[in-house]
Image: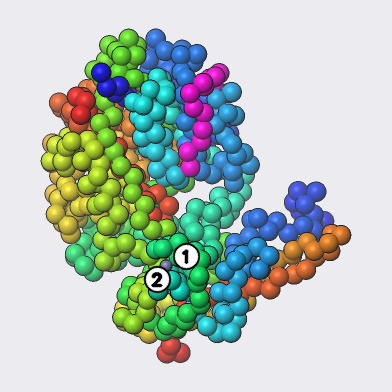
């Protein structure tokens, strides 16, 4: 019988400005993760993947996987490696764990991720962002910090499709509302439309609540082979049905779309992910999209096929991404409210989708059976999708 | 005043934290790009085997993997498709306003569009459709150890665009 990978437990530390190091936060997240599945002991875990991109710059630590495994009391015998895909590192780790488990190479894998971004001096993390994009060709133009590029994307979406600042504000208001009751989120704040529209500018047209913050944090999940999963938990099983990761360019001059609001690389990733999972966008009951900026979520609902191209703004404004709407999104607060410790974000998203499909989410989508997570990473150079289901493919 | 910082790094230049490319030929096989910039030329590599023009310049052709490449010029003028102006919160190393433009290099160009910083331009001046041109400027030199701890300072340039109309 074919081996299948399930996500069976997850946990995260408090995200935000933390008085803690990267290794501290990873321990907190791993503790909560194992408390989520009382039958599982560290010695049962045979594989470990650790997603982090800034450890080299902000914690002066490379080869982080064995360092973290040692702190967590893990003694991996199938795999012990770091994954560096910036904002999509966590989701990438989950896709890799699926492959390792289904190939028979591993049985029970912990996928953890984390970043320590609040350094003693703030300029160091901003300066280090020069390493997050093509250092020689985009960074010298001052594109290391993402707001200018996403401001340009927003202006292009406004120009081509008539998207409004108010529609962008609705993304933030909706996601902040969910995050306001999430104790792990960086911000527990109910945001009003008036506050969002009156916020100080970052790079026009982006204002404060259009942008996710800088965040310290860590998260961890357990990916297990189906029969082991059944032994370990009585909760409904959540299968990793499929996924995809597409990278069509890296330097901004080679942007793959017709214009900057046309995300051809996300369409390619979505098509392949849906095919691999044997579902279509109409089958997704709940999703986590990469709302690093409000405009990102507007474009993502279009390219993921939840609405027509160009209609993302009105789709969100009309409440279709709230619970009760066509496709509830970011029901734990998303990046905008939870924050974005790059390597941990995809893992946080996976935890929320797992809980939704197990019927134990804070804001529950009734009867959710199929869920999706999406990340963009770097200067919008790569798109990563994971599709989960109560039933295997 | 005492020099602040990590005592063992006093008077050291941490080149691995440099915000500009390492352009010197000892460290970079496309250093000719920067030599061409110094001569006022905006260039990239074309494959002699299949004719493909790639940007940024490279060591192999990404289409056919030939390493028989030659330098070709790109247009030095283009038109602004869209742009952003950042006034507050400009990152270390850049001056306010930090302006970025998505530039159309024209139908004749093998590279259709480029995202570039726009300098020599006050806030409010740039418009969609504005004509911009290449501008080359010096950036800080960095040391290279030659022998016996001796240092050679590698001079560097980089590029941006600026409005044609002053
Ligand atoms: Zn070729």
Q: Where residue B79 appears, x then y in whole percent?
A: 35, 81
From the image, tell me which residue sits under label 1. Answer: B66
x 62%, y 39%: residue: A61
In the rendered view, tell whether residue B25 sits above or below residue A324. Answer: below
- Which quarter is ligand 1 in? bottom left
Q: Pointers 1 and 2 in contact (CB under 8 A)?
A: yes
As drawn, A191 above or below A141:
above
Residue B123 quadrant: bottom left
Total labels drawn: 2
For label 1, being within 8 Å of ligand 1 is answered: yes
Say few, some or many: other residues with alpha carbon within 10 Å of mark 1 (under 14 / 14 to 19 / 20 or more). some
Distance from disc 1 to disc 2, alpha carbons, whole Å, reads: 8 Å
Query: Which chain does the numbered disc 2 sit on?
Result: B
Residue A370, magenta (yes or no): no
Q: Which chain is disc 1 placed on?
A: B
Q: Residue at x 50, y 70 (%)?
A: B68
Badge 2: few (under 14), some or many (20 or more) residues near its Cα, within 10 Å? Answer: some
Residue at x 40%, y 43% (from the top left corner): A88
Magenta stretch in the rendered image: A71-84
Tell whether circle 2 marks a residue whose Cβ is less than 8 angstroms from ligand 1.
yes
Quadrant of the frame with the N terminus of chain A: top left
Tag of residue B50? 2
Q: Can I make out residue A8 in this image?
A: no
Looking at the rendered structure, the secondary structure element under dot 1 is loop
């Amino acid at each position: 019988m074919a081996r299948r990978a399930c996500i069976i437990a997850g946990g995260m530390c408090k995200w935000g400005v933390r008085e803690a190091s990267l290794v501290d936060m990873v321990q907190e997240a791993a503790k909560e993760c194992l408390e989520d599945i009382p039958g599982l002991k560290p010695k049962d875990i045979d594989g470990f993947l650790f997603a982090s991109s800034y450890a080299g710059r902000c914690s002066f630590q490379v080869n982080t996987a064995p360092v973290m495994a040692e702190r967590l009391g893990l003694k991996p015998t199938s795999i012990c490696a770091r994954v560096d895909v910036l904002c999509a590192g966590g989701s990438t780790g989950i896709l890799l764990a699926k492959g390792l488990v289904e190939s028979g190479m591993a049985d029970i894998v912990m996928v953890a991720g984390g970043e320590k971004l609040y350094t003693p001096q703030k300029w160091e993390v901003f300066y280090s962002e020069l390493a997050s994009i093509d250092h020689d060709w985009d960074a010298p133009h001052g594109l290391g910090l993402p707001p200018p590029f996403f401001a340009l994307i927003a202006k292009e979406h406004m120009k081509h499709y008539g998207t409004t600042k108010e529609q962008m504000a609705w993304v933030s208001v909706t996601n902040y509302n969910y995050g306001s009751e999430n104790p792990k989120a960086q911000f527990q704040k109910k945001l009003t439309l008036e506050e969002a529209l009156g916020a100080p500018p970052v790079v026009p047209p982006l204002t404060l609540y259009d942008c996710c913050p800088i965040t310290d944090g860590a998260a961890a999940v357990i990916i297990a082979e189906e029969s082991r999963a059944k032994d370990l938990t009585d909760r409904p099983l959540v299968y990793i049905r499929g996924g995809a990761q597409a990278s069509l360019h890296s330097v901004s001059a080679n942007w793959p779309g017709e214009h900057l609001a046309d995300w051809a690389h996300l369409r390619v990733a979505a098509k392949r992910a849906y095919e691999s999972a044997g579902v279509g966008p109409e089958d997704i009951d709940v999703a986590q999209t990469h709302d690093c900026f409000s405009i990102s979520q507007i474009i993502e609902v279009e390219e993921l096929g939840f609405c027509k191209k160009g209609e993302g703004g009105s789709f969100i404004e009309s409440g279709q991404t709230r619970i009760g709407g066509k496709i509830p999104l970011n029901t734990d607060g998303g990046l905008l409210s939870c924050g974005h410790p790059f390597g941990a974000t995809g893992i946080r998203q996976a935890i929320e989708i797992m809980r939704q499909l197990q019927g134990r989410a804070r804001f529950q989508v009734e009867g959710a059976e199929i869920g999706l997570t999406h990340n963009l990473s770097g200067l919008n150079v790569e798109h990563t999708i994971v599709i989960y289901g109560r039933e295997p493919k | 005043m005492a020099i602040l910082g990590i005592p063992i790094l006093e008077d050291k230049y941490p080149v691995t934290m440099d915000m500009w490319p390492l352009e010197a030929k000892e460290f970079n096989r496309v250093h000719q790009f920067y030599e061409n910039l110094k001569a006022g030329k905006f260039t990239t590599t074309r494959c002699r085997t299949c004719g493909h023009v790639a940007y940024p310049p490279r060591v192999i052709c990404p289409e056919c993997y030939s390493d028989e490449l030659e330098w070709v010029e790109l247009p030095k003028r283009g038109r602004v498709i869209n742009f952003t102006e950042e006034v507050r919160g400009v990152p270390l190393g850049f001056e306010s306003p930090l302006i970025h433009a998505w530039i159309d290099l024209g139908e004749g160009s093998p590279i259709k569009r480029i995202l570039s910083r726009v300098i020599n331009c006050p806030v409010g001046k740039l418009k969609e459709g504005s004509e911009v041109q290449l501008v080359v400027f010096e950036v800080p030199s960095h040391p290279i150890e030659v022998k016996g701890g001796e240092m050679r300072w590698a001079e560097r340039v980089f590029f941006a665009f600026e409005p044609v109309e002053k």
